[in-house]
Image: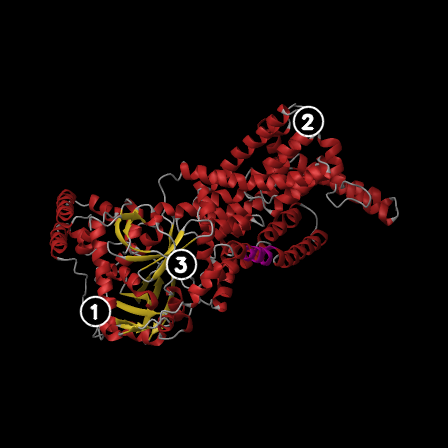
Amino acid sequence: MSQVKHKRLSDLHPGESATVVEVQAKGPVRRRLLEMGFIRGAHLKIEKLAPLGDPMELVIKGYHLSLRREEGDCILVTQAQ
Amino acid sequence: MVTIALAGNPNCGKTSIFNALTGAHHHVGNWPGVTVERRSGACHMGSLEVEVVDLPGTYSLAAQSEDERIAARFLADPAVDVIVNVLDASNLERNLYLTTQLLELHRPLVFALNMTDDAERKGIQIDLEALAILLGGPVVPTVGNRHEGNQELKDAIARVVSGEESALRPVSVNYGDDIERELAKLAQEIARDERLASEQPPRWLALQLLEAAPEAEELVEQSHARSAIQAQLRTSLDFLENHLGADGGTLLAERRYGFSHGLVKEAIKETGNGQRTFTEKLDGLLTHRWLGIPIFIATMIGVYALTFILGKYPQDWIAAGFAHLHDWAATHVPPGELASLLVDGIIPGVGAVVVFVPVIMLLMGCIAFLEDTGYMARAAFIMDRLMHLMGLHGKSFIPLIMGTGCNVPAVQATRTIESRTDRFITILVCPLVSCSARLQVYILIAGTFFPPVQAALAIMALHFLGFGLAMLMGKLLRLTLFRGDNAPFVMELPPYRLPVLKSTVIHMWEKGRVFLSRAGTVILAGATLVWFLSHYPGIANRQWTAERQQMEETIRARKLPAVQEAQQLTAIQHAHESRVMNSSLAARFGKLLQPALAPILDPDHNRPEAWKDGVALTAGFVAKEIVVGTMAVVHQASAEKAEEGAPLSPLQDTLKRRSGMTPLTALAFLVFILIYTPCLGTVGMILKETRSWAWTAFSIAYGLGLGWVLAFATVYLGRIFGYA
């Protein structure tokens, strides 16, 4: 695991898939992200960015969700090799 | 009487199950958090009389948002006999997260596996028996908007209530040895306070404490056993952090999703053919990088046209109907105070309320349609970047744009914004957007004091100023009064669905009715008050009335040609109305306001008639376009259209010659008109939507303050640049 580079969710590009490593947000944002399925090991796939570049649309736990860049910044992921 | 609560995620079709159960048709939403209010309906299940309560759709019971608090509190109520957990069969894993919390409440649970048609289309096969065993309650497949499975659901509920249901057994998530041990210790400490333990199952409270839920912490704070509980909580959290390497919230969420994932694996066979679904294909177009925004703009133009252009017809009919009623009453009711109350107070007042109904119904219908189809979430997705810059939410865009038509339905349209903070900020900045009523005042004043091109430019500039201020105030409110209240933008993009037209129509009807009963009463009361202020004491002055009648008789006695007689009678009527108005309480109020308004409307103290602006502004509180009519009365001139060949209407002519306004003070007046206070209709709506007199008062106060400051800045800067 230590060699695998962690990325921020917001750095991923449309079409890329990744696995959640950690949610670094605090308080209500953290809890909301957890209950929406951003738990360790959860798979996700970036679908697209909004026409203005933010927010992003992704698929996690089989449903579609949109997140702002600032929320994506506090989610660490690893990309499948 | 048996009480059942409907719980489930947003977009799981809970409201359609509610409609099917109760027969009371409500709005079927497709937008996170569409049921903000508690809805209940009665129905019969066999011999049982049942009250069904539709809870707000939530993703969890963590009691973070308003909706979750409502749901969590109601579910803790011992009056709830059965909980019906509505699950979206096509999105089961996430939907079961809430279920893991509901299981902890130790109430009989019935599961409505909704939207099974969607799931089938996605190639999802669900083993109902296995699911019922794993969840410890009956599982009924349903398709809410087609009422499929409705009878079976009722039967299952009836069986649970009568104790005949065999599938019922207690199930709860196993959080693993370490967590379970700490939970047991915490629950033991909680159980020492009997009152606390009777309110909620101790284990459920312990779980909430491990997640640091504020509501649970408050409950413990009031307990006599609080020090023991808090000490145990600290020990448990430290232990878990050290042994499992994560905080309580993370650990619980992981175990819950573990439970849900395991369950889905056991009970579901996915034969997904890997093809792009209808939603994905449509989304490819509607949120396309280049096409997304044009499609959105076209949709907005469509909604706007439907609401304000199509809505104009019924509005005109209503206005014409009330005008007829007004004329009829004016000629048939013997003149006097009561007649004036009826003719100038109540009839226009009721008219001013009713005239909003068509646009409200149309706009709410459009919005419900957009929500039901799922496009609303995409609209927010597309606009969020722009709105977020202004301290607002993607969903704030539609209310702001609709505000250019009328602020009243625009404020109501903020209902779609889930987060209280985002909604309140949007409500507070919405009135800054210049509406079509204000346009009438701009046309009057700008047309009087500016040459045509400049007038058009000024009117455009006012609209931009309104938007600019809305952005600025949004950001400012976010940074000050609503600081730290940052709701995350984690928004589900639900699948596209075909709305049920019937429920949209019923939704429109409800919105119109609610407006009439809640906001309407406030507006009518306000309109009557302003009528009183602008007619008393003059209208009760017998001598004036006698003088008027005498003059009218003198004219009639002269037997002039009909046209001339009518003209003179109108002049007398205007003179009388002007006399009443100019000596009224409102006029006195206007004069009282004069010192406050002088710096913006009479900076050189050379306008003896400046107080009349104050009167017009006071009356304009009812509705901004009333400023025009009031100016006509106070200046004793007709506001009718200019005669052919004349560039200005009689009122404009009078204003130009006699009011003493200069182009600069006229501009300041317009800036003030734009901002000074939401009109009465909007105030009524703000009160209805915020349910807070304090925020309603704030919206008026900051409008007045901001309007004054900017009007003053207009005069001040204008002078620096050499205008007078």
Between B313 and B700, the residue placed more toward the observer is B313
Nearer the observer: mark 3 or 1; the answer is 3
In the rendered image, residue B379, in percent from the top left (x then y), is placed at 47, 55
* Amino acid identity at mark 2: Arg
Label at residue B112:
none
Marks 3 and 1 sit apart, C-alpha to C-alpha, by 29 Å
Residues at discs 2 and 1 in contact (Cβ within 8 Å)? no
Using the image, name the chain to which the residue with label 1 belongs: B
Between B418 and B275, the residue placed more toward the observer is B275
Residue B552, compared with residue B62, is above or below; it is: above
* Amino acid identity at mark 3: Leu
- Sooner in the amino-acid sequence: mark 3 or mark 1: 1
Q: Is residue B120 magenta?
A: no
What residue did someone put label 1 on?
B134
* Residue at image location 20% in from the left, 57% down from the top: B255
What residue did someone put label 3 on?
B493
Using the image, name the chain to which the residue with label 2 belongs: B
**Is residue B543 shown to the viewer in this render?**
no
